[in-house]
Image (cartoon, rainbow, N blue to C red):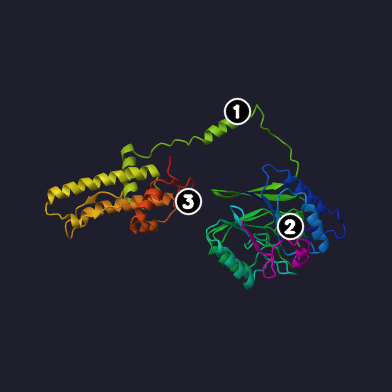
Amino acid sequence: MLIAQITDIHLGFERDNPGEMNRLRLDQAVKHLAAMEPRPDLLLCTGDLTDRGDRTSYERLREALAPLPFPYYLAVGNHDLRGPLLEVFPETKSSGGFVQYSIDEHPLRIVIIDSLEENRHAGAFGPERARWLDATLAAQPDKPTLIVLHHPPVVTGIDWMTLVPEETWAPRLTAIVARHQQVVGAIAGHVHRPIVAPWAGTTLRVCPSCAPQVTLDLRPMDLDHPDNRPLIQEEPPAFALHMWTPGGLVTHYGRVEEPQTLLRFDSGFQPVLRHFAEEREQEPKYPRLGSETRSLTSSVSQALFGFRGRLRRRDFWLATLGLAVAGEALSSLARIAIPEVVDGFGFSFAVAGFGSVGVERGSITTALLLAWPSLAVMVKRLHDRDRSGWWLLFLLVPAAGFIYWLVDLGMLPGTKVANRYGLPPTDA
């Protein structure tokens, strides 16, 4: 799924001028996005759509967006007014008097938040909006979700545009989003600069503006002493492309301009790109640290007795079969060495659903010898599937537990990329 984003259009900055600079910049951006291959699935316009919130500017915005060959969705910023916007764009959803809604028909769910307090430059997010967002996210807890708003709820470092500690709306919003683990990212505008920051357990991406950009200057500002620093600068109109993949959300920033081409994909450069592709398919080989024996011993020890890291599917089966054989051997030895062992006191291992070890009444030493590595192997295999070791409790369910063990641990592949338990095992 490919999502385009433009923000801070500020139509109507030049009052009564339908051919103003910001309209020309918007037309350039729309033309660029409409011709893009692959074509975006949709466009998100993340606030400050107009400069004064007047109906005429919204009408010009609708006219400018009409050539797009894909749908677009609007969010409000501090320069917008909800009434005129909803009059000109009646298809834009609202709830409780706020321009807030969700887009549910795509693999990635999109939830648009209203951070506007009319006639206020800074953001806002009151209790009513907070309850709506909490309920909206709770309605689909298992679907990956992207949060969309105008004001970044983080400190950006641009002193005259950034969040300050006195603003309570951002902690309120952050607390709600942090409770919902399906949120895979958030996008915003407002600052007229590309910014990436951690937020609420995910990542916030701020898109540069369609209108002129804010100057990158991280020096503190003394409002009592003007220092003649530049605030706004002329740069090409900008946009973002957010690509949703099985591995997560990938964002690219672009500018609408005709750059000078320094290199092309022609027959002369073709061998170089082929070499790059071959390299990516071959992992580098690193020498083992220490002796081969020590490395092998360490690997086996970690596989059978450690509970950290991940275990690939092949090694899981090798360990499972090895432990099953060991269980049968110990069982046979127990019958020979302790004839009075009663099968009724046998201990069945969950290693492979078969094999039991006779345990003398009051003695569990032999059982623990295999129970510990069995648990270690299964926990690390769950980690490879990006699951907690607590999922082993499902094995206690009769019949269904064994089917779960066989399918989830024994058949399904692990995650191809790093997860919360570590890097993927080599050759997984």
Residue drawn at point x = 24 percent, y = 46 percent: 326
Pointer 3: residues within 10 angstroms few (<14), some, or many (20+)? Answer: some
Look at the image and tell me in which quarter the C terminus lies.
top left
For the residues marked 1 and 3, what is the alpha-carbon distance in whole angstroms?
35 Å
Does residue 126 show up magenta in the picture?
no
Where is mark 3, residue-wise?
419
The residue type indicated by label 3 comes to: Asn
Secondary element at tag 2 = loop
| Residue at mark 2 | 8
Task: Say which residue label 1 marks.
Answer: 271
Q: Residue drawn at (33%, 53%), measured in percent from left and top?
A: 375
Cβ–Cβ under 8 Å for marks 1 and 3: no
**Considering only vertical position in the picture, is 339 above or below 177?**
above
- Left or right of 167, for residue 377: left
Whole-percent x, y for residue 35 in the image: 73, 43
Q: Is 90 in the magenta?
A: yes
Q: Is mark 1 on a helix, strand or loop?
A: helix
Q: Earlier in the sequence, mark 1 or mark 3?
A: 1
Q: Give the range drawn in magenta.
A: 81-104
Type of residue at label 1? Pro
Residue 52 locus on image (x, y percent): 80, 64
Q: Position of residue 153 (x, y in %)?
A: 63, 63
